[in-house]
Image (cartoon, helix red, strand yellow):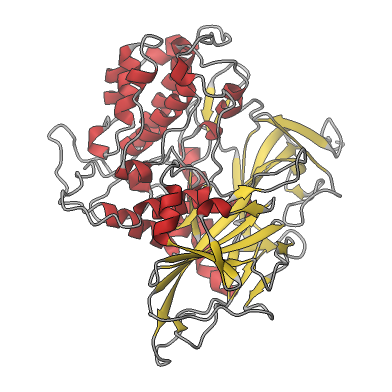
Amino acid sequence: MTASHPPSGSEQTLVIGGNASVLTPESTPPDFLPVGTRLHEFEITGMIGEGGFGVVYLAYDHLLQRQVALKEYLPASLATRGSGHAVTLRSRRHVEVYEKGLQSFINEARLLARFDHPALVKVHRFWEANETAYLVMPYYEGPTLKTALQAMPGPPDEFWIRRILDPLLDALELIHGQGCLHRDIAPDNILLQSDGRPVLLDFGAARRVIADVTQALTVILKPGYAPIEQYADMPGVRQGPWTDLYALGAVVHFMITGQTPPLAVGRLLQDSRVTLEVQASGRYSAALLKAVDRCLAVKGEDRPQSVAQMRELIGQQPNQLQQATEAPPEQPRVIASPPTSLQAPRAFAWHRRQAWTGAILAALIGGWLLYSNATKPSDQGQAQSAQEAVASTPAIDATPPTPPSAKAANAKDAKLQAAWQATLMAASPSFGLAVSDLKNPLRVGRDSLGLQLNSARSGWIYLLLWDKANDQISLIFPNDVDREHRLEAGQALHLPRPRWNYVADAPAGEWEIMLLVSESPRDFSQLGLTPDGVMLSASAVKVEQALAGSDIGRLTLAGVPDCAPASRCPLDHGAMTLTLREVEGSSEPRQP
């Protein structure tokens, strides 16, 4: 028997989610498996997508003679490609974190294999090799919901929205019934098949576990789609079906308005979201609009507590979706003349996926919320834990989060902190920023800021310092004595630089450092920074005043791209933060 070959040869152009990607041996990034690589019966023919924790390839199954999607666990911040196909760690310090993330990836494959539902991605095969793991899934050719909506001239009608919503509710009810949560629902994680039916993609398991193991690494959430309980693990703040329903409500909000809901952290301070009952009244049924508004409540206990409650709110019967989805597919009827409030540019203002440190988020949310003891609603039973422990998708706790205490902590610097977090939230994980050799703590008057920064992508690097003891924001790099701030992929930045040192000064306290790598040069003048020696600085109060007229979801702390007129100006950036302590004297031992 002769071996079969991919029908299009060794070079494959694929279109999925509206994005075309060509992968050839010459253009393959060094960390990716090259075209032609054979893993058992599967041959790599192209690339579908990549993120901070893995790569999804297009592959050809020589046994069954079909195209498939092959996913490889490869967290960019922890590991790289070694000799042959093997994955190797960037540092021995990452062994425990990498292995726990790998186990979570394995658990996710087993979890997906347990479910058989047309709106959930299937797993054909799974195995471990090359110090990593792989799973094979069907190749779903079609756009993401995000791409499909961007192509529409206006918002879709209610019938089309319900044809998307109903199967997703059915799929969520299935996974919730097994004691699991999805926790990664967003328009770019929902794929529309050729017949228009949705498929909810992977659970994003590994990132949750990696973030739980170490505070120094980043956890990725989708801004606007993650409710407040996903931002940090805190006593009294629980996740449950209401967590996924918040994200699903945000998806419907986006379908109707073309806008992502305001960030949950900002809504804690001031909830500026205009309800759909106001924005879309008369164009959709009151039941649908009210149900989505309920899903988007900031407090978990104010949302529907189960899919069954959500169905009741929107007036859908449990088996109604089968009748709806058996109807012939049709193009959505768009609403041609939305109210004035919806006539912002229909080019959807997408935020990038964000990266942030868990410790900083816990401090931020902890400053706003003090939760009292949880109270269980009378109509909510205790959810049954799953028989198999899934590391990244915990068993549901049926007790919703309790309301915040009236004795909320002082919200000093809250606007600045929220803008700081919003900058992280819009960062792309593809930069794979990683820091090593960090000097922490720093002795006042003696130690300089010291670290090594690596980036998987080239760009211009900026360092913002928030000196909380002196209540000051500074752009410490680039500066007047060191303007060379271009960083090439794989080239490390070492601090302190030969021409300058930034020494810890009195009073002792805490620094927060933001490391930002941007595709384009950036201008930070809108922050109100002025010359301060060789750097630019301003008081935190002055920066907050500069932010006062802006939405905290905008990238004010990341500056604005500064490109030549009529030139291409890429917007991507990567970002991460570090918290450093300044101490008096020299007796305190250093952290590794």
Is 121 positioned to the left or the right of 79 in the image? left
The spot of residue 502 in percent (x, y) is: 56, 78
The quadrant of the image that shows the N terminus is top right
The foreground one among 124 and 309 is 309
Q: Residue at x 59, y 17 (%)?
A: 152
Percent x, y of residue 388: 38, 48
**Above or below 514: residue 254:** above
Hey, which quadrant is residue 180 in on the image? top left
Please state if 564 lies on the left or on the right of 127 as rendered: right
Q: Nearer the viewer, residue 554 or 297?
A: 554
Name the image quarter holding residue 316.
Answer: top left
Q: Nearer the viewer, residue 363 or 266?
A: 266
Location of residue 323 with respect to 388 vertically, above or below: above
Looking at the image, residue 316 sits to the left or right of residue 427; the answer is: left
Q: Is residue 447 something that shows in the picture? A: yes
Q: How far from the left and from the top, in percent, is residue 530?
A: 54, 62
